[in-house]
Image (spheres, rainbow, N blue to C red):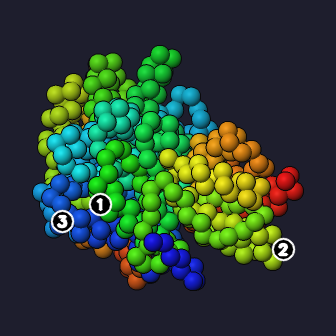
Amino acid sequence: MISNKRIKKLEIFATEIRLETMKAFAKLGFGHVGGAMSIVDTLSVLYGEIMKIDPANPKWPDRDWLVVSKGHAGPSVYSALAIKGYFDKKELLTLNMPGTNLPSHCDRNKTVGIDMTTGSLGQGISTAIGVALGNRMDKRDNYTYLILGDGECDEGQIWEGALFAAHQKLDNLISFVDYNKKQLDGMTCEINDLGDLDAKFHEFGWHAQRIDGHDIAAIYEAIDEAKKTKGKPSMIVLDTIKGKGCCFVEEMYFNHHITISQEQSKRTLSELENRYTDLKREWEDMQ
Amino acid sequence: MIKLVDYVQKENILMKDVYCSTLMDLAEKDENVVVLDSDLMNSIGTVPFAKKYPERTFNCGVQEANMIGVAAGLSATGKIPYAHTFGPFASRRCCDQVFISASYAKLNVRIVGSDPGVTAAFNGGTHMPFEDVGIMRTIPEMTIIEPVDSIMLEDMIRQLKDVYGVYYLRLLRKNAVQIYEKGSTFEIGKGVLLREGTDITIISTGILVSESLKAADALEKDGIHARVVNMFTIKPIDREMIVRCAKETGAVVTAENHNIINGLGSAVAEVLIEECPVPMGRIGVKDLFGEVGPVDYLQKRFELTAEDIVKEVKKVIVKK
Ligand SMILES: Cc1ncc(C[n+]2csc(CCOP(=O)(O)OP(=O)(O)O)c2C)c(N)n1
């Protein structure tokens, strides 16, 4: 069980990730806000508690790896990395600017701490499997984490990987689907219905769980359970809200890639700042 | 009939809106017209089509390879599919489906790849196709068209309804620079002479066409009379026109928003080397991956501006 104090800390971290990410989007005036925000709580748990990492030694061979296959969530990953100290937070404001190290989509050659290049949806599952296999061959006891989008699960490559990872009994691979029910053109159930995603992965031979993807404790416990599962890869389907934590984005129907007015960004930043202050106070009260 | 505008400037209308309205017009006249997409209908602006013709719209979700196969199958039953995704995914991601299911099977598919080259801008390197023409060009019997403005786009979308085969349309979705007057019609496979000139020919396509015209203006001031051609059909390439220009002007520079390997420059070079070798230069991406940023920055970064064309022309012309 994770203590209330640690949960609070991760809630603070998540809010900080959202805040830093929103600042970078606001400076540009546009971005993939919806899918960047829905995955933040998972990033907070991974980078805040779970992953064995060393920001001073990002290529440490025994580290845990993270492949963000829905590469357009890069901006929130960059915020998590900067807060963890992989690079200066100031750099976050260079998002998508000429010559930046922080492009829209995750790039292992550009950004310190990014383990895999993604952006063409569907491909991250295979590279993550390769990483997990390689580490297993080298007898490392580390984990490879993988984040997929729900729309991304339309791609056949996801199901090729699903079949293969199970066949390989790849229990050092722990994967998530950010099931925010939306893709670019709208609701996944209206475009190409994914049905019961956890049942599908279960049927493919994975250990599958389904949880509230904004519940820090639930995410933590699910990963814990996944680690205890031997002989199979693990899938954690996250019920999430696209745009989570930014009211105006949550309320929009089409919130995949949006433009952000100054008014909207000002309001959202102040909402997030208030939430951050409240959480900090709650944290101090716990001491 | 082809008529040029007197004054070259950015269009007010978005290419994607013209794409959609033309398809809707065609769909009204021909019930076989079908639209396919891979979760990018909002990007390419075909939502109004989907609303009006839901039974003729297939948004497959994020699955480009499946989409191309489905389009090929639909065409086997007499449907006329226009299948869209971003250029990199239309070419790289479903190369074998395009090759086998559509081309080798000799079916009837229009593949629309949007955001050519640097116009992928803020989507960055993973989404920036400098190779789509190259991939498509090596597939036998493929036709490759890059409409330069909304006038040409509309004409091409209309013409493509009644052709047979596999066609790749390289589509800018934002505002183009208008080159042609409304009502102009074009012949697939025939380049268009935009500007007369006797010293060198600049053969260009896509967003490099307006840069080439700018370059020709600048060169004029230095006493160099550059001819400009819009080679909007990259395959089959207009051999006759290339040879004529080479003979009449004695030198050629190509300009494209694509890798210089296996794009327009290569196609032109192949013709020249076989039929009329003259000094030649190529403006295009010098075998590099794309990166993120605004279009104007990327054009400079990858040397795709009028200034780059001017420099190249001056380098080539001394070899005459
Ligand atoms: C192969 C491929 N096809 C299309 C795209 C364009 N694209 C980027 S994100 C996206 C929608 C993804 O939806 P989902 O996986 O649900 O992401 P989320 O809702 O979490 O942002 C699309 C179609 C892409 N990046 N890669």
The alpha-carbon separation of the residues under discs 1 and 2 comes to 47 Å
Residue at 22% x, 44% y is: B75
Outermost residue, right side: B318
The residue type indicated by label 2 comes to Asp
What residue would you read off at disc 3? B29
Please report the residue visible at 31 percent of the width from the left and 23 percent of the height from the top.
A164
Q: Secondary structure at mark 2?
A: loop
Q: What type is the residue that disc 3 sits on?
A: Lys
Left or right: B293 with respect to A65?
right
Give the mark nearer the N terminus: 1 vs 3. Answer: 3
The residue to which callout 2 is attached is: B222
Q: Secondary structure at mark 3?
A: helix
Position of the N terminus of chain B by quadrant: bottom left
Using the rendered view, name the quadrant where residue A153 is placed: top left
Q: Is residue B98 something that shows in the picture?
A: yes
Q: Residues within 10 Å of mark 1 (few under 14, many from 20)?
A: many
The mark lying in front, picked from 1 and 3, is: 3
Mark 2 falls within which chain? Answer: B
Residue B320 vertical position relative to residue B199 in the rendered view, above or below: above
Q: CA distance from mark 3 to mark 2?
A: 52 Å
The residue tagged 1 is B41
- Secondary structure under tag 1 reads helix
Q: Left of B226 or right of it: where is A243?
A: left
Ranked by sequence position, the earlier of labels 1 and 2 is 1
Where residue A73 appears, as percent x and y from the top left, is 41, 53
Badge 3 sits on which subunit? B
Q: Amino acid at mark 1?
A: Met
Is B186 located above or below residue A41 in the figure? below
Q: Of residues A45 and A197, which is closer to you in this image?
A: A197
